[in-house]
Structure formats: structure tokens, C-alpha cells
Amino acid sequence: MAAHLTPTSVFKCLADETRVRLMLLITAEQELCVCELTSALDESQPKISRHLAQLRTCGLLADRRQGQWVYYRLHPNLPAWVIAVLDATLGANQQWLGPDAKRLEGMAGRCVPGADS
């Protein structure tokens, strides 16, 4: 699925602030559930889920279900250049992503399988 990625398709997928924030948080943390992402971005679950679906359709994300929870990670077949772009963007924009990362940090232990939402 990720083999079709071109610079144009990748940057079109990332041409939205919410999707970029999602991708950078997932790049930083390796895997996050919808609950964590909703809290980190301080956005509604339907909005976050819609953007995650777009990123999955683009081939940038993969997901796995564990009970009622859906976890997202970078697609395992992403070309190295896409990962390099994400890593460089993350490294150069820690301050921009700071509020999201701080809210995510505050989620520690509150969004786990078997716990009440």
C-alpha cells in the first residue's frame, strides 16, 4: 500500500494541521490509540477518527484493534524518505508540538484497555 507514495501524495495527505499533528505524535510515540490522540489534540473523537482514516487511506498509517481500542502506528512499509521527513519535521518543531505532547503526557494510564473511558 505504501509503495504508491509520491512526494505529491504524501504532502497532500499532510496538508492539514490536524493530520500533521497526528503524524508527528505517532512518529514520536510509535503507537497511540484514538483516546490518546483525542486528548492530546483536544479535538472531538469523530474529527480525529476522520483524519486518522484519511491518513490510513493515504498509506501513511496502519492500525490494529485490541478490544474496543484502535491503535495507530506508521505504516510498516513507509519509504525511508517519508520517515526521514517526519523525523526531521518532528525534531525541528518540538515547541510547536509541545502543547499536544504535554496533554498526551497527562494521559498516562488513563486510556488503557479495560479502564473506563
Image (cartoon, helix red, strand yellow):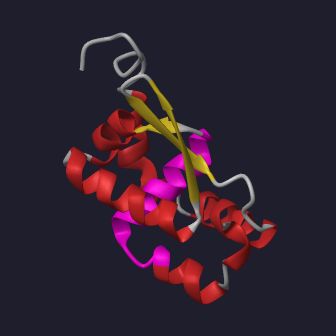
Q: Is residue 111 left or right of residue 91?
A: left
Image position of 97 with respect to 92: above or below: above
Q: In this view, does 42 lie to the left or right of 37?
A: left
Query: In the rendered image, which quarter is residue 80 located in?
Result: bottom right
- Residue at x 36% of width, y 69% of height: 17
Residue 82, horizontal then vertical, whole percent? 70, 69
- Residue 48 painted magenta: no
Residue 20, horizontal then vertical, whole percent? 45, 65
- Residue at x 41% of width, y 56% of height: 52
41 or 51: nearer the viewer: 51
Image position of 4 with respect to 89: above or below: below
Examine the residues drawn in magenta and state their main secondary structure: helix
Residue 114, horizontal then vertical, whole percent? 37, 10
Query: Going by the picture, which residue comes out furthest to the right?
Result: 80
Task: Evaluate whether residue 8 shows in this view.
Answer: yes
- Residue at x 22% of width, y 51% of height: 46
Query: In the rendered image, which quarter is residue 40 located in?
Result: top left
Q: Is residue 49 left or right of residue 64?
A: left
